[in-house]
């Protein structure tokens, strides 16, 4: 890192100002600190030593300068001739000028085993923390390794056995000891715990669906792979069949496999779990592996992939599904029809298809796909089909999100420092943490707002707002203000109703909202609640990106009213209005991402809420209004899950041709209910357009609708049949397993 800083021009002021500061007074001393000094040996140590010389030269410091102070820490440096010689060679400073200090190990007296029962009783009484010093020494003695004649880290169960000399069920006694040490005022010996985690590098599966290694309780007619392994193998250790890497769709959970290719005569291929060439040439992520060396296979003999028989274009490549037969030995034959037990993806184009991604960009089972960029031509795919590898950055993010929940409730309890030797990894981790933190908070606010809507009456909210604004929470005030702004007629009707003199139209309006608004919340109202809560937390409502932190060079918060007077000076109304429009547009995009989240984490799949579309009265429909409303809601949900809404990558290009997923869904609905497919598709398209929900199979901005409507209707789910009946609006294969899918298709609603 120092080497990079020394070379970058924009970092120059750091060195220039430091040098000027040193020249300003001989009393100014520059301190150079080096940790883990003993690790800088050999070639890498020489490189660091020369780098430090460059740094000192840049600052104008000589090796014998009185303005240079060096502090170093090492676990294995002695104050003998060899140790001083190493210091002189590494820092380029006379070794006699160093002072080596070494701490003295604390003498600990052997103690008898602790009584587990007594420890637990004292912990229950709240008196165990008074023995913190004694307990810390006992734990330290339990970490002593006689064979090495030194103290070293030990497993928790080993420490428990040595402390109590009896079984410590669930480590209950050891946990009480650690809690007492942490809560004690005095600790004789500081202790440090180590948590080691091994990230998952992938999952692999036997190609024999009838594999003997699968337990009976996990066998069913829909299983397409055999025994699962946590590491790549050539053959299954139970049945001897080929083992390949397991691939899952993050949207529907569908299973496929993939393997490295060894070309055989007659256009056949042999697939294996490990590369047939140099191991270092194989990218770690399956989405980065090219078709030349890697082959994907979808085991399915009873179902065709979505869009089969209809090639599609992806980044100048003509892509299509092709039937294939994969033997248990791993031999793959492509293009066969008789005896085919699955499908592969084939590509043709001007560019070499061998460098294109091996994994298809859309799921053959649910049809979900992602947008592709120019990186596709270099072998990088954006696809819901993923392996099971976990990156260190993902693991770190999970640890940091969980630590505050386990270390304590106060900030001083769960303060955490994360460091890494890799600068790129540190940057990715920091960005990921900020994004995930914002997403976590947004999800909580979103769900809280939807849950609150199930219990709140809009008329009651406006009544309380008109009588006593102070009685409302900040979120309720924001929602009421938004309703009053977007629907002033309703607010006037509420006041007239409370005064006992509403007109007939006003009374009808009140009655309409009293009967329809329970359980629903308008998009703008939901956004207003979230925005207010974000500001109270000191977070930009627009997200964690750099663009969300400022507007025209000013911090984001200056464009909003402070939650408390005097916290900051607010920008002028005209400038604030422009900034708020921009930030609220970004918040709309973030809300849409969470509402239509991938991996079946959307609000409908989690049984929280759904998007109703009311069929306009008097409209000629090919089915009943109730059934038509369900079909419309299903189509809106599918458009959202496919990211076809304003602000998304595919939302700005309205199309008149129905997406494949919706086309397949409407085909099934038309077949089941005996209606004309073309008439049904035209009715759905025109109704979504006329109601302002969508434009050309792309959802409009949810906040562009001036009238206040019940946009999100919370559903209460009861039995399994109720759940299946509710989610069966998406007949396109919502469920991750075929068993549940068949249950859905058999529901009485369809």
Image: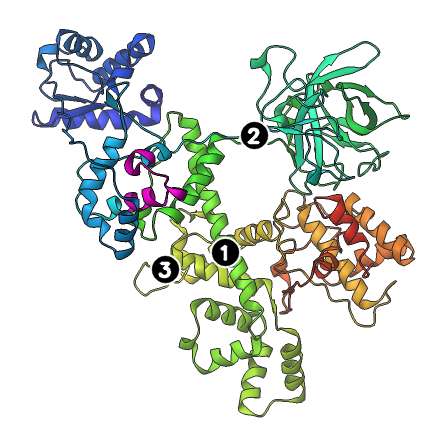
The answer to whether 713 appears left or right of 683 in the picture is left
Query: Which of the numbered marks, if any, corresponds to residue 454?
Result: none
User: Which of the image's four quarters has the N terminus?
Assistant: top left
Check disc 3 and report its element: helix, strand or loop.
Answer: loop
Q: Which residue is mark 2?
A: 389
Q: Which residue is mark 3?
A: 570
The residue lying at 37 percent from left, 39 percent from top is 167
Check disc 2 and report its element: helix, strand or loop.
Answer: loop
The answer to whether 129 appears left or right of 368 in the picture is left
Residue 190 makes an appearance in the image: no
Crowding at dot 2, Cα within 10 Å, few <14 / some 14-19 / many 20+, comes out as some
For marks 2 and 3, give the CA distance.
47 Å
Quick one: label 2 or label 1, which is nearer the N terminus?
2
Q: Which residue is mark 1?
A: 444
Q: Nearer the viewer, residue 636 or 234?
A: 234
Crowding at dot 1, Cα within 10 Å, few <14 / some 14-19 / many 20+, comes out as few
Crowding at dot 3, Cα within 10 Å, few <14 / some 14-19 / many 20+, comes out as some
Q: Position of residue 365 (x, y in %)?
A: 76, 39
Q: Nearer the viewer, residue 225 or 623?
A: 225
Are the residues at dot 2 and dot 1 in contact (C-beta closer than 8 Å)? Answer: no
Q: Is residue 67 magenta?
A: no
Check disc 1 and report its element: helix, strand or loop.
Answer: helix
The answer to whether 683 appears left or right of 565 in the picture is right
Quick one: label 2 or label 3, which is nearer the N terminus?
2
For marks 3 and 1, give the CA distance.
28 Å
Camera-near label (2 vs 1) is 2
Q: Position of residue 209 (x, y in %)?
A: 75, 30
**Residue range (magenta):** 161-179
Quick one: label 3 or label 1, which is nearer the N terminus?
1
Tell me which corner region of the image, top left, top right, bottom left or bottom right, holds residue 309. Answer: top right
């Amino acid at each position: 890192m120092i080497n990079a800083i020394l070379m970058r021009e924009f970092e120059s002021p750091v060195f220039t100002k430091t040098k000027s500061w040193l020249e300003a007074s001989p009393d100014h001393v520059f301190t150079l600190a080096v940790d883990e000094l003993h690790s800088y040996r050999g070639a890498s140590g020489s490189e660091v030593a020369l780098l430090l010389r460059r740094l000192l030269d840049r600052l104008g410091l000589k090796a014998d300068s009185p303005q240079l102070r060096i502090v170093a820490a090492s676990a294995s440096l002695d104050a003998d001739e060899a140790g001083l010689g190493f210091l002189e060679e590494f820092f380029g400073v006379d070794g006699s000028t160093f002072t080596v200090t070494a701490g003295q190990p604390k003498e600990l007296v052997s103690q008898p085993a602790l009584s587990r029962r007594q420890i637990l009783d004292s912990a229950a009484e709240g008196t165990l923390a008074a023995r913190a010093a004694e307990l810390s020494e006992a734990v330290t003695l339990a970490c002593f390794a006689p064979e090495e004649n030194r103290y070293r880290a030990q497993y928790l169960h080993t420490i428990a056995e040595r402390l109590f000399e009896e079984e410590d069920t669930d480590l209950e006694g050891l946990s009480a000891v650690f809690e007492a040490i942490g809560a004690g005022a005095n600790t004789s010996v500081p202790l440090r715990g180590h948590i080691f985690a091994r990230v998952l590098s992938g999952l692999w599966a036997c190609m024999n669906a009838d594999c003997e290694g699968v337990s009976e309780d996990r066998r069913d007619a829909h299983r397409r792979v055999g025994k699962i392994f946590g590491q790549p193998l050539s053959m299954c250790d139970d049945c001897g069949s080929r083992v390949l890497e397991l691939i899952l769709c993050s949207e529907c959970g569908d299973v496929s496999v993939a393997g490295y290719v060894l070309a055989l005569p007659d256009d056949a291929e042999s697939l294996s779990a490990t590369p047939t060439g140099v191991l270092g040439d194989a990218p770690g992520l399956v989405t980065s592996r090219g078709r030349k060396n890697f082959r994907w296979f979808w085991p399915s003999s009873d179902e065709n992939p979505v869009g089969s028989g209809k090639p599609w274009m992806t980044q100048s490549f003509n892509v299509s599904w092709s039937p294939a037969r994969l033997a248990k030995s791993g031999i793959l034959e492509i293009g066969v029809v008789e005896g085919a037990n699955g499908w592969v993806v084939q590509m043709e184009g001007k560019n070499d298809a061998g460098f294109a991604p091996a994994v298809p960009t859309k799921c053959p089972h649910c049809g979900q796909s992602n947008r592709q960029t120019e990186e596709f031509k270099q072998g990088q795919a954006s696809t819901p089909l993923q392996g099971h590898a976990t990156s260190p950055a993902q693991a770190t993010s999970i640890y940091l999100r969980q630590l505050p929940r386990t270390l304590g409730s106060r900030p001083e309890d769960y303060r955490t420092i994360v460091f890494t030797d890799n600068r790129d990894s540190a940057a990715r981790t920091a960005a990921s943490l900020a994004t995930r933190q914002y997403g976590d908070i947004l999800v909580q606010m979103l769900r809280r707002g939807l849950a609150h809507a199930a219990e709140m009456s809009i008329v009651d909210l406006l009544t309380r707002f008109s009588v006593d604004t102070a009685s409302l929470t900040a979120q309720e005030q924001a929602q009421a203000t938004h309703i009053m702004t977007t629907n002033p007629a309703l607010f006037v009707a509420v006041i007239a109703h409370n005064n006992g003199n509403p007109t007939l139209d006003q009374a009808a309006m009140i009655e309409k909202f009293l009967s329809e608004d329970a359980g629903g919340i308008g998009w703008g109202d939901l956004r207003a609640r979230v925005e207010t809560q974000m500001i109270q937390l000191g977070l930009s409502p627009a997200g964690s990106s750099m663009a969300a932190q400022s507007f025209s060079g000013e911090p984001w918060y200056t464009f909003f009213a402070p939650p408390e007077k005097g916290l900051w000076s607010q920008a002028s109304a005209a400038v604030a209005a422009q900034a708020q429009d921009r930030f609220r547009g970004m918040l709309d995009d973030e809300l849409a991402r969470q509402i239509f989240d991938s991996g079946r984490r959307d609000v409908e799949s989690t049984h929280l809420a759904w998007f109703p579309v009311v069929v306009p009265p008097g409209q000629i429909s090919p089915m009943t209004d109730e059934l038509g409303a369900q079909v419309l809601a299903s189509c809106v949900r599918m458009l959202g899950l496919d990211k076809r809404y304003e602000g998304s990558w595919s939302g700005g290009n309205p199309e008149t041709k129905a997406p494949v997923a919706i086309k397949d869904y409407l085909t099934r609905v038309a077949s089941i209910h005996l209606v004309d497919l073309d008439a049904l598709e035209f009715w759905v398209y025109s109704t979504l357009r006329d109601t302002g929900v969508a434009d050309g199979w792309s959802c409009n901005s949810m906040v562009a609708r001036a009238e206040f409507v019940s946009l999100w209707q919370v559903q209460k789910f009861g039995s399994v049949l109720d759940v299946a009946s509710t989610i069966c609006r998406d007949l396109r294969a919502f469920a991750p397993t075929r068993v549940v899918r068949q249950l859905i298709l058999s529901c009485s609603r369809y």
